[in-house]
């Protein structure tokens, strides 16, 4: 507000100087020419300053927006709060937020995967991680890649963390049966060979 008052005072001052130099004196008067030149220079400088301070930045902003702005609305990441809680070590809060995301976007496997990772890696609770992956897998019909991912993760947890070889073998055989002639079936077959079951 103060800058507009100052600009108004300066504008009135410059206009009064220019008008007094143009109105005063006679047409052929040398004094009139001498007083008009500085008044017109002052007015030109003032207009130039206003152009540089206000008009040029507005033109630049418009041009930049026209060239660089995609005019797309930026979507917020629904898992941002969960990642922030995870980063500060608040694992219970992170799990709660990931569960909310899973409820609102049921076909997104990422929240389930992140919950299972936190339970396994940070809380050192492989049983909870297995329960989460089982719950996710049984919650609805997943696309093949997602279902195979959950089943492969479960097989690994059973074998490596719980040392439950039988459950691991059973899940790998289910993968071969459910996803025949896919890379998931091939991976399960390879794992069974490594375990000496084929």
Image (cartoon, rainbow, N blue to C red):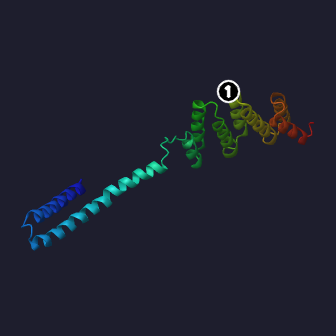
Residue 162: image location, x then y, percent: 79, 39
Give the image quarter of residue 186. Answer: top right
What crowding class fits label 1: few (fewer than 14 Cα within 10 Å), some (14-19), or many (20 or more)?
A: few
Residue at image position (57%, 31%) is 104
Q: Quadrant of residue 125?
A: top right
Could you tell me which secondary element the residue under label 1 belongs to? Answer: helix
Q: Residue at x 42, y 52 (%)?
A: 63
Quarter of the image that includes the C terminus? top right
Q: Position of residue 36 (x, y in %)?
A: 15, 68
As drawn, 52 above or below 104: below
The image quadrant of residue 3 is bottom left
Vertical comparison of 64 with 91: above or below:
below
Q: Which residue is mark 1?
A: 139
- Percent x, y of residue 67: 47, 50
Residue 80, horizontal then vertical, whole percent: 55, 43
Taking depth in this image into account, of 55 and 2 the one nearest to the observer is 55
Q: Please state if 155 lies on the left or on the right of 46 as rendered.
A: right
Tell whether 172 sits left or right of 88: right
Nearest the viewer among 130 and 4 is 4
Question: Which residue is depicted at the point 62% across and 30% down?
Answer: 106
Left or right: 39, with 120 as reference point: left
Q: 23 or 162: which is nearer to us?
A: 23
């Amino acid at each position: 507000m103060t800058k507009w008052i100052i600009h108004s005072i300066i504008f009135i001052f410059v206009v009064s100087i220019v008008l007094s130099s143009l109105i005063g004196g006679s047409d052929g008067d040398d004094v009139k020419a001498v007083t008009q030149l500085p008044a017109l220079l002052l007015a030109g400088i003032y207009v130039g300053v206003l152009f540089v301070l206000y008009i040029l930045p507005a033109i630049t902003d418009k041009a930049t927006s026209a060239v660089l702005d995609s005019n797309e609305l930026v979507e917020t990441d629904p898992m941002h709060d969960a990642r922030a809680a995870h980063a500060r070590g608040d694992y219970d809060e992170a799990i709660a937020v990931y569960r909310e995301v899973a409820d609102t976007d049921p076909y997104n496997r990422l929240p389930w995967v992140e919950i299972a990772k936190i339970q396994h890696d940070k809380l050192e609770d492989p049983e909870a991680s297995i329960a989460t992956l089982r719950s996710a897998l049984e919650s609805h019909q997943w696309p093949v890649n997602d279902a195979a991912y959950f089943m492969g993760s479960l097989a690994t947890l059973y074998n490596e963390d719980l040392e439950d070889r039988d459950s691991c073998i059973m899940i790998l055989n289910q993968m071969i049966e459910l996803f025949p002639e896919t890379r998931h079936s091939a991976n399960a077959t390879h794992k069974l060979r490594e375990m000496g079951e084929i």
